[in-house]
Image (spheres, rainbow, N blue to C red):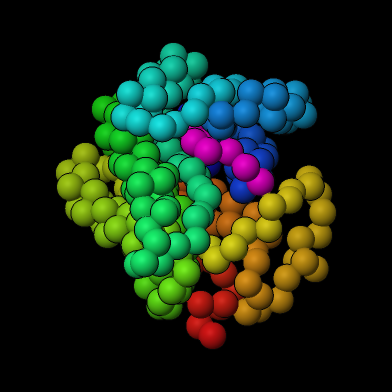
């Protein structure tokens, strides 16, 4: 994989790790979050590895998602991959649905809005990758009702999108970790930071799978939900 134009929406620790991977493979990366200073710091640190730009924009409705895609196209000229990492969770339950609107926005509406405008700029062989949670289909977390149903709906939406886009050759896949360790350091031995069955996963493990899904060697993987949690969801 090299020479691809890639947008990462919602850049945190996982976005840092993925950006590093992609730059080492000679891709052009645009990163996004609402934190301008954080993005500037990442670009300053990572620019020695390759071509990386940033767009500071809060994604809170369809219009902001359309604007992000259009601004990224201005920088990238074309779009070969979109990786959506907009996250966060709110604890709630059926008696207090305080997180319903925000979780549906973060984990279903924003990803779908971004995909809607991205596909207009994607050619055959492009990829869309969503981030879910490995436990949403196996466990019933009574304190995370709105979060869980939003992620579950996103996984189903990804499969429908993959089917809709078959003739256009645009693949849609989901990577599903459990909790992501909110830290990343270039060159560290992250394998020492986890063991099978752990709740948290280093971002490197997840970004390695995303990098593979963007790579042409994964061209026959489509409509998949891939758990990347070291087996935690099996417990």
* Relative side of 91 to 184, left or right: left
Q: Quadrant of residue 199?
A: bottom right
For the C terminus, give its image quadrant. Answer: bottom right
Q: Which residues are magenta?
A: 6-13
Q: Is residue 78 visible?
A: no
Residue nearest the observer in this picture, 50 or 130: 130
Residue nearest the observer in this picture, 3 or 145: 145
| Rendered location of residue 42, percent (x, y) | 71, 30
| Rendered location of residue 4, percent (x, y) | 49, 32
- The residue lying at 44 percent from left, 31 percent from top is 59
Query: Given the current orientation, which residue lies at the most extreme front position?
Result: 95
- The residue lying at 58 percent from left, 38 percent from top is 11
Is 169 above or below relative to 40? below
Q: Is residue 108 visible?
A: yes
| Rendered location of residue 205, percent (x, y) | 63, 60
- The residue lying at 74 percent from left, 49 percent from top is 184
Is 165 above or below relative to 3? below
Q: Is residue 60 magenta?
A: no
Q: Is residue 7 magenta?
A: yes
Residue nearest the observer in this picture, 65 or 125: 65
Q: How many marks?
A: 0
Query: Given the current orientation, which residue lies at the most extreme top position?
Result: 74
Is 13 above or below relative to 69? below
| Rendered location of residue 60, percent (x, y) | 41, 32
- The residue lying at 71 percent from left, 76 percent from top is 195
Residue nearest the observer in this picture, 119 or 200: 200
* Relative side of 225 to 209, left or right: left
């Amino acid at each position: 994989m090299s020479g691809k134009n890639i947008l990462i929406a919602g850049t945190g620790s996982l976005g840092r790790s993925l950006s590093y991977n992609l730059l080492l493979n000679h891709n052009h990366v645009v990163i996004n979050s609402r934190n301008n200073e954080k993005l500037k710091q990442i670009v300053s640190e990572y620019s020695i590895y390759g071509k990386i730009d940033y767009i500071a924009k809060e994604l809170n409705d369809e219009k902001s998602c359309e604007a992000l895609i259009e601004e990224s196209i201005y920088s990238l000229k074309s779009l070969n991959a979109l990786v959506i990492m907009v996250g966060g969770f709110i604890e709630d339950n059926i008696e207090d649905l305080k997180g319903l609107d925000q979780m549906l926005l973060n984990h279903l509406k924003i990803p779908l809005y971004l995909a809607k405008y991205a596909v207009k700029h994607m050619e055959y062989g492009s990829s869309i990758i969503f981030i879910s949670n490995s436990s949403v289909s196996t466990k019933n977390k009574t304190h995370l009702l709105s979060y869980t149903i939003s992620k579950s709906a996103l996984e189903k939406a990804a499969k429908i999108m993959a089917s809709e886009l078959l003739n256009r050759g645009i693949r849609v896949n989901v990577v599903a970790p459990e909790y992501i360790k909110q830290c990343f350091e270039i060159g560290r031995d992250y394998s020492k930071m986890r063991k099978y069955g752990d709740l948290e996963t280093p971002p490197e493990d997840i970004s390695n799978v995303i990098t593979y899904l963007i790579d042409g060697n994964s061209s026959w993987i489509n409509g998949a939900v891939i758990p990347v949690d070291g087996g935690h969801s099996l417990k």
